[in-house]
Amino acid sequence: MVAGFIFMISSDCNEGKMVGPVIRLSRACLPLLLLALTSCSSSDTAEQQTELASSTAQAAAMVTDAWLSGAAPSCYASSALLSFAETLADAARQVQSASPSDPARRDALSTALSRLSNAANQAASAVKTEHHAQADQAQQELRAAQGDLAKAYSEYFAPQR
């Protein structure tokens, strides 16, 4: 399976002054994109989706951080965050539809992925409306949800007793 991110930037983002920050931000996200592309070689859907979600969530946190520091334009950051939220929601759906050996573990993993998607959506909304405090809060939620994902992932793949 090959995965990738496509960023759609609306036409109102075509100001010449935004090109530099967008290029710098794109270069910063390139290693995460490569990690996401190479991490999808496993045959286990839950593992693939969790690895993709982990790098997507990290990219969402980076974009939010870049916007909060003034290094990324709002229109680019909100578009990227919406794309990340969709990727995370799709990962949650795919994990939920996977046939688990333990439904409770699958549900915990799916819930963590949904929490990440919601946090990315909150960040996108905050960036779009230029509410820095809400974006900061959404970034904190992203980081907390990443911890939930790591815990759910380790429990999902832990040997069953």
Image (cartoon, rainbow, N blue to C red):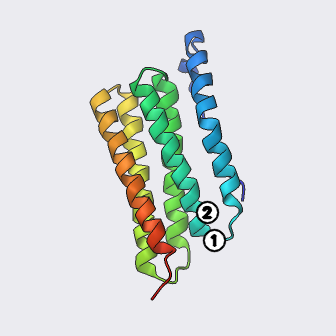
Please report the residue visible at 43 percent of the width from the left and 75 percent of the height from the top: 105
Q: Residue at x 35, y 51 (%)?
A: 144
Q: Element type at marker 2?
A: helix
Q: Nearer the viewer, residue 24 or 95?
A: 24
- Spatial CA span between label 1 and label 2: 6 Å
Residue type highlighted by circle 2: Gln
Counting from the top left corner in percent of width and height, residue 102 is at 46, 82
Residue 18, quarter of the rendered image: top right
Q: Answer few, some or many: residues within 10 Å of disc 2's Cα (few below 14, many 20 plus, some between 14 and 19).
A: many
Please say if the residues under marks 1 and 2 sit with CB atoms less than 8 Å apart.
yes
Q: Is residue 106 above or below residue 54?
A: below
Q: Could you tell me which residue is drawn at 67 percent across and 59 percent down?
A: 40
Q: Is residue 56 above or below residue 12?
A: below
Mark 1 lies on a secondary structure that is: loop
Where 55 falls versus 29 (above or below)? below
- Residue with the mark numbered 2: 48
Task: Decide if residue 80 is on the left or right side of residue 70.
Answer: right
9 or 69: which is nearer to us? 69
Q: Position of residue 91 (x, y in %)?
A: 54, 59
The residue to which callout 1 is attached is 44
Residue 75: image location, x then y, percent: 49, 25
